[in-house]
Amino acid sequence: MNALCHYFAFLSLCQYNLALVAYATSIGEYLQHNNHNMFITEKIISIFAPHTCILCDTEGLVLCGWCSQEAFYSVPPRCYRCRAASAESATCKKCRSGSVLSNVWVFTEYGGVSREVLRRLKFGRAQAAAQDIARALDDVVPFLAPDTVITHVPTATSRVRMRGYDQSRLIAKEFARLRSLPYRSLLLRIGQARQVGSTRVERARQVDGAFRLLRRIPEKVLLIDDVVTTGATIESAAKLLKTHGAKKVHAAVFAQKQ
Ligand SMILES: [Zn+2]
Ligand SMILES: [Zn+2]
């Protein structure tokens, strides 16, 4: 009889917890819909439904310390355009005429675990995933001059509106915090279109004129983006910064698509 009581007490506790998770999630959704600070939203949800590691399900982080060491195929220093080996990931001589970026540091190839981290960044646990990605970038980006300003490549506005936040902005702010460097929002995305072309020329045409400047441009800028494919978007952003006062523009990207 006693055991039965315990069993029912346990059952009702489970139901209570489930109800709390549902309640917290609905508060979270309400706040997101109403454009409140999504970090608060995430904090509320994580109290009741903590993060779990993508690979081993351990509670705590999007990717636990143990798994994160093995999870990614790390990219060696290379030119991001032709992928030839290049010291400090500098744009190589051959590609320099088609690029305004001095160096592009890429953390990993796109796919598998990196795709899942990015999926969580876009559709779920944004803050935790942004912290993981910023830490990954901190590993591959060398020392930066203290007057370097960190900024992000803005995501198409329709997608930001849908999600309530810009994932690249979260990463850039977190990276700036890790490096004790200033973060500034420099660019505004005006194009809404999703990129569909596959060639570099097609994509470059689509993003041409896709950005506007928000303020005076500093001399040294590090652009941060979550994913790079042909580089058309990041090059278009860098070109605008360079024609308006930036002397050196670097970029750091979490994952590169084939
Ligand atoms: Zn793990
Ligand atoms: Zn190259």
Image (spheres, helix red, strand yellow):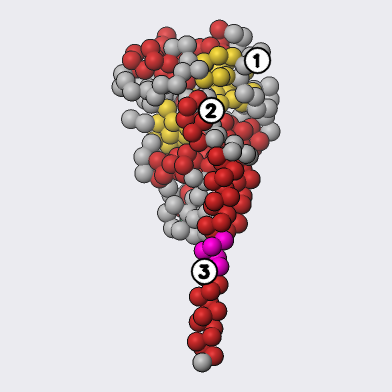
> Was residue 19 drawn as part of the magenta stretch in this picture?
yes
Residue indicated by mark 1:
215
User: For the view shown, which residue lies furthest in the left direction?
Assistant: 198
Of the two numbered discs 1 and 2 on the same chain, state the one appearing first in sequence.
1
Residue 185 can be seen in this image: yes
Instruction: Tell me the kind of residue under disc 3.
Output: Gln
Residue indicated by mark 2:
224
User: For the view shown, which residue lies furthest in the top direction?
Assistant: 243
Q: Nearer the viewer, residue 112 or 38?
A: 38
Residue 145 can be seen in this image: no
Instruction: Tell me the kind of residue under disc 2.
Output: Ile
Assess disc 1: are there few (<14), some (14-19) or many (≥20) residues with their C-alpha within 10 Å of its C-alpha: few
Residue indicated by mark 3:
15
Q: What element carries label 1?
A: loop
Q: Nearer the viewer, residue 93 or 224?
A: 224
Q: Nearer the viewer, residue 253 or 10?
A: 10
> Was residue 18 drawn as part of the magenta stretch in this picture?
yes
Q: What element carries label 3?
A: helix
Q: Give the range drawn in magenta.
A: 15-20
